[in-house]
Amino acid sequence: MTNSINEIPNVKAMFVIGSNPTEAHPVIGTKMKQALAKGAKLIVADPRCIDLAEHADVWLRLRPGTDIALINGIMNIILANEWENKEFIAERTEGFEKVREAVQQYTPEVVSKITGVPVEQLQEAAKIYATAERASIFYTLGITEHTCGTDNVMSLANLAMLTGNIGKESSGVNPMRGQNNVQGACDMGALPNVYPGYQQVASPEVRAKFEAAWGVPLDPNPGFMIPDMFGAAVSKDLRALYVMGEDPVITDADANHVRKGLEALDFLVVQEIFLSETAKLADVVLPGASFAEKTGTFTNTERRVQMVNQAIKPIGNAKTDGEIICELATRMGYPFNYESSAEVMQEISKLAPQFGGITHERLGTQGLQWPVPHAEHPGTKFLHEGKFNRGKGLFMAIENQLPAEMPDEEYPFLLNTGRKLSHYNVFTQHSPSLGDHSPEELAEVNPSDAKKLGIEDGEVVQVASRRGELKTKVKVTERVPEGMVFMTLHYFDSPTNVLTNGAYDKVTKTYEYKVCGVKISKIN
Amino acid sequence: MEWLTLTIDGREVSVPKGTTVLDACRMNNIPIPTLCHAPELTSAGACRLCVVQIEGMRNLPPSCVTQVAQGMKVETQNPKVRNARKTILELLVANHPLDCMTCQKMGDCSLAEYAYDYGVTGTVYQGEKRCLPIDDGNPFILRDPNKCILCGKCIKACTEIQGKSILDFSFRGFDTQVGPAFNLPYNESDCDFCGSCVSVCPVGALTEKQMAGKGRPWEVSKVQTTCPFCGVGCNFDLNVKDGKVIGVTSNPEVPVNGKALCVKGRFGMDMIYSDNRITTPLIRKNGELVPAEWDEALDLVATKLGEIKKTYGPNSIAALSSAHCTNEENYLMQKFMRAVIGTNNVDHCART
Ligand code: SF4
Ligand code: SF4
Ligand code: SF4
Ligand code: FES
C-alpha cells in the first residue's frame, strides 16, 4: 500500500474496486466503516453485492472483466468536467496527452454499454472521486487476478495521477496484500528475477554484490515462475521441487494440471505444518513449525515489518522452517551458521537497502514501515511524497480487453472466485472452531438462474469447466448477478481450482482466477 | 496547543485544552475507577463510578465526560467521593452472581477489583439475583447475561470499532439486558464474531469460550505476536499456560489494530493444535509415507538434491517459498536456492 492502514479513517472518498475488505481484510474493512461514520463517501465497483456495496454512495455493478473500460470512462467524465488536477499533471507526471486521447472514445454511453453500469452512476462516481479533498483507491485480487491484471493496475494509477490523489496522507493507490507475509516473501527475493530488496538478478553490479556477500558465483538468468514450473516438470526440464508452506494443488489455478506436474517430478520435498494435499504427493515430508513456535518477522500490507515472537516450543518433533533450511544447506556443503533469526535479519539489512535500518531490537512492539534506509530512520508512513520512484509518474494509455475465457453456449456461467470472512485460503480449515462455524462451500447462484436450472437453496449440484468438475452445495442469493456463480478457495471437498483457468497475466504471470466459463448441472 | 492548569488532590498539573478530568488524572498517575469508559470508545457517563468532586459544582460530576477548565480544583479520593462510588458498587454487587471462584474473568474483573478496593461486602442491599439462560450456541463467545452490569461498552465497541450494530439494550428496568438486538442468541444475529465486544467487557458477562477453564489471568503469560492469517498484520497477545497456547487477547498498545481483531485472529488459534499437524518427518517407502528420524530425512533430501543437481544441472531444481513463513525464512530459502543449489528457480504464491 502507498498509505498506512491508520490513515484510512481520515479518507474523504474511498474507491473500492475488485476487493471485498470486510471479508478478506476484515480489520481494514472496519477502518473503512470508521471513515464512513466520519462522513466519508464510498464508491464500490464489484459485480457482487459485497457487504460494503450496501454502505456505498454509488455501487457500480460492472460486468466482470470490464474494469479498464470503467476506469477509462470515469477519466473521460473527469476530463469533460475539468476536474483533473492540472498542476499535479504538469509537475509530477508525463505521458498525459496519450491518455487523454485514448479515453476520448470511452464516452459515458459507450462505457455504460460495455460495463452494464448506468451513465448517471458513472458520473456520480467520477464526481465523488475527483472532487474529494483526500481520495484513496483500494484494490486486491479482483483487479490483479486477470489476464489483463497489470493493465488494470496501470489504469488505476492513471486515475490517481489524473486527480493528484497520490503521495499524500490518506490519499493514494492501495493494493491490499492477501496472505500474511506475501509482502515480505516478495521483499526477501523469493521471486525468480530479483534478489532481496527487488534488486535485479540480471544486473551485473547487483549480482557482483551478492556473489561477494555469499562467496559463490551466481546464475545470471532469471528462474521459473510458478506457472512455468508445472509445465517444465511434465517436460522433464524440472526434476525436483522443494515446496515450503504452500499447497499448490489446492491454491493454484487449473489444479489438475498442477497435480500432473507434481506427479511427473523425480523428487518432491514438502515442508509443511499440516498434511496438505501437496504433501500427500511428496517423497519426503518435513514438519515445520507454526508462527506460535518461532521468532522472526512478517511484513504487512502497509510495509510494516513486525515481530513474530515464539510463544511455545515446536509441537512434537517439528522444527522451524529456518532451522530445516540451515541444516540442509550445511549438509549440502554450504554451512548456514546462524545463531538466531535476529542474525539473519542483520544479514538482510546489509543487503536490502529498504531494510538497512531494521533490527529485531528496533522493531520491538511497534514495528517499522520500510523503507528504513538507516539505523536512525523512523520508517515511511506513505510513499511517493513529492516524487515517484522513477521521478515523474508515467501515464499509460490502456485499452479494454476481454478475459481469456468467457462464458459460451457450452459453459454458460461465469465463475468468479474469492474469500469469505471466517476462512483464510485453506489454512483456517485446520481450526476446529472456524471449521465448525463455516463448514462447507456454498456456491452463490442468482435466484432466476436457480429457477431455470430447477435447483434449490442448499441443493448439491455439479459444476464443471473445460478443465475439471466438482460437487458443491448452492446458496441461492441476489448477491450475485444473473449468469454468475461465486465460489471460494477454502474447502478441500469442493476444490474450486480444478475449474479455474490457468491463463495468466503476461507480466506478472498471475492466474486469471476471477473469470472462466462453467456449467451447472443438477444431480439426480 | 493551549495548556490549562488545574489542581488534583492538592497537586498542580498542566494538561492540553480539551482533556477530560479522567484523562488528566490518568496522565498524572492518579487512579480513578471506571466501568463504562474505554479510551478507544466515546464516553457515555453512564456508570458514574468515575465521579470526583470539583470545587464550585454542586453534584459529583463523572470525570470521564467533564472537560478540564483553567484553575479547576479536583478531589478524587475524599470520603464523599469514595462513599458515592461505594454505593454504586454496592448496588451493582447486590444483584450480581457471586460465583467468582469459578468465573473465567476472576483476576481480570473490574467489578471485583473495585469491590475489593472499596470494601464492598454485598450485604448492604439485598438485591434479587437474575436467573437468565446462558448463550453458548456459537463456538466463540460465551454470554452470561446474569453477570452483565449494563455498562454499554460492548454496544459501543460493536458500533464504533466494528462498524456493526448488533448489540443493544432490550427490555426495561430490572429486566434490562444487553445483547444482540431483540435478545437473540449471538449465532442467530448478524454478528461477525470479531470479539471486540468481549475485549471491552469489564466483567464476566462476555468471555472467550475456548479459554473457559483453561487458565487464570495470573497463571498466563502473554506473548505479543503478529497474526498469521491475512495481510492486515494485526498484533495480539497469545495467552500461554504450561507451554500451551490457550487463546488470544487483544492488546490496545499494538500499532495497526489496537483492540480490534477479526474472527480468524481472535478465535482461529486452535489450528496450532489441529489433528492434521505433521509432527515427525515422513519418507515414502513402498508407496507409503512412513515416519522417519530427522537425520534420515535430511540426509535423503540433501543426497537426492545433490544427485539431481549433478546429473541434470542446478536449473532442474526449483523451490516454492512461502507467504506464510517469516521474512528470515524466505531469505534463507532464496539464498539456499541461489547460493547452495545455484539456480534462480524460486517463487511463491505472491499472486493469491
Ligand atoms: S463479536 Fe463483533 S460483530 Fe459480534 S456483537 Fe461483538 S462486536 Fe459486534
Ligand atoms: S455485556 Fe459486558 S460490556 Fe456489555 S453491557 Fe454487559 S457488562 Fe457491559
Ligand atoms: S486478525 Fe483478522 S484482519 Fe487481523 S491480521 Fe488476522 S486475519 Fe487479518
Ligand atoms: S466511567 Fe465515567 S461514567 Fe462510567
Image (cartoon, rainbow, N blue to C red):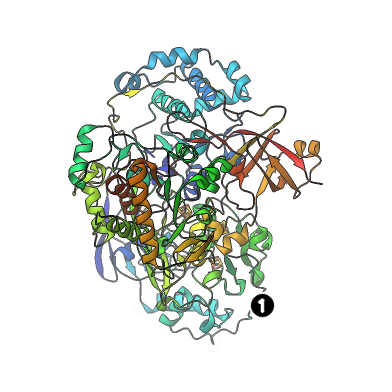
Residue B6 location (% of width, % of height): 28, 62
> In the displayed structure, would residue A306 be above or below residue B102?
above
- For residue A411, side relative to residue A127 (left or right): right
- For residue B221, side relative to residue A118 (left or right): left
Residue A208 location (% of width, % of height): 19, 38
- For residue A261, side relative to residue B72 (left or right): right
Q: Quadrant location of the N terminus of chain A?
A: top left
Q: How many marks?
A: 1
**Amino acid identity at mark 1:** Cys
Q: Chain of mark 1?
A: B
Q: Is residue B186 visible?
A: yes
* Disc 1 residue: CB within 8 Å of ligand 2: no
Which residue is located at x 26 percent, y 71 percent? B10
Observer-nearest of B100 and A66: A66
Q: For mark 1, give the secondary structure.
A: loop
Observer-nearest of B272 and B95: B272
Specify the quadrant of the image occupied by residue A188: top left
Observer-nearest of B122 and A122: A122
User: How dense is the environment of label 1, judged by Cα within 10 Å: few (below 14), some, or many (20 and up)?
Assistant: few
Observer-nearest of A248 and B6: A248
| Residue at the front extreme, as displayed | B311
Task: Dividing the image into four quarters, tell me where ligand 2 lies.
Answer: bottom right
Residue A140 location (% of width, % of height): 48, 39
- For residue A203, side relative to residue B307 (left or right): left
Please give the residue where the numbered disc 1 appears in the rendered image.
B131
Which residue is located at x 50 percent, y 19 percent? A399
Q: Is residue B168 visible?
A: no
